[in-house]
Amino acid sequence: MGRPIYVERFVRAPMEALWNATQRPEAHERWDLRFTEIRYLARASEKDPQRFLYATRIGFGLRIAGEGESIGARDRDGDRTSALRFWSNDAKSLIREGSGYWRYAPADGGIRFITLYDYETRFGAVGRFADLLFRPILGWATAWSFDRLRLWLERGIDPAVSLERSAIHWVARLALAFIWLYHGIVPKLVAGAVLEIVLGVALLVVRDARPLLVLSGALGIGLGLVTSVRVPDLVVAPFQPITLGVAMAALAAIAVRADSELPRAARCLRQAPAK
């Protein structure tokens, strides 16, 4: 096993609301990026672990399926804990089996929602190597999903809307980054192109890109006008600078507007606080 995945997010919501959103399969699969299907199995008594089936669609009509079981408990301080085991016999699954817990710890004004889990991989050394990339992605997906859940419970933002806004934001943002990088690298790789390359890279990596998006829109329009004045023949050429500048400004505006209250993995704690 690698380093266990730890994620914590403070959620300003009643305990029952958070419990229901995470323990009811039809609610859980709405906000958790890691799963597309969760189904509880019937159990003989309330004392038995709750068995469940899960699946994740990975595209091209393929899905990875697995099973698990969980046990919920309360302690005298008001905390709730849901311990779980999970495993997969699906040959496509990198994860063979694992275990962990969800903890719901009441705090002033809300609840500390915490998970810690770890797993074993299949495919031997190849699986362990693949997990060097897969584990950080899985940790990010867990944290992003926790913040998506928080927005649902605190702000009433439907999880489907959060995903849609995120897709719109990143499509527009990646398109602008591509334009800057293309114009900085492909036509010429000289000192005058350094700003374009830096701006393109920054749009890919900074957390809050809104200032850069506004700058991109302004520069797109400004450079289109300046270029058209300096080279008038370009005004009537196909895909001329003014139309490119307008398109860049529109992409920037779309990305900024879609950025409103997006889920962000960076808002979650990724290491357990020191005791």
Image (cartoon, grey):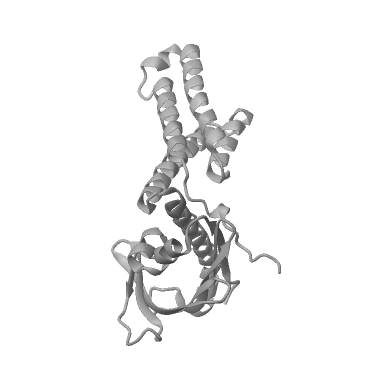
Image coordinates of residue 68 in percent, x first then y, are 40, 79
Left or right: residue 159 compared with residue 103: left
Q: Residue furthest left?
A: 61
Question: Which of these two is toward me, 145 or 111?
Answer: 111
Question: Which of these two is toward me, 191 or 62?
Answer: 62
Image coordinates of residue 148 in percent, x first then y, are 45, 54
Please tell me which residue is depicted at 44% across the width and 48% down the height of the picture: 155
- Is there any visible trace of residue 102 in the rendered image? yes
State which quadrant residue 195 falls in: top right
Image coordinates of residue 95 in percent, x first then y, are 46, 75
From the image, which quarter does the N terminus lie in? bottom right
Left or right: residue 207 compared with residue 235: right
State which quadrant residue 245 falls in: top left
Please tell me which residue is depicted at 41% across the width and 73% down the height of the picture: 93
Please tell me which residue is depicted at 41% across the width and 24% down the height of the picture: 246
Question: Which of these two is toward me, 125 or 164?
Answer: 164
From the image, which quarter does the C terminus lie in? bottom right
Question: Which of these two is toward me, 183 or 174?
Answer: 174
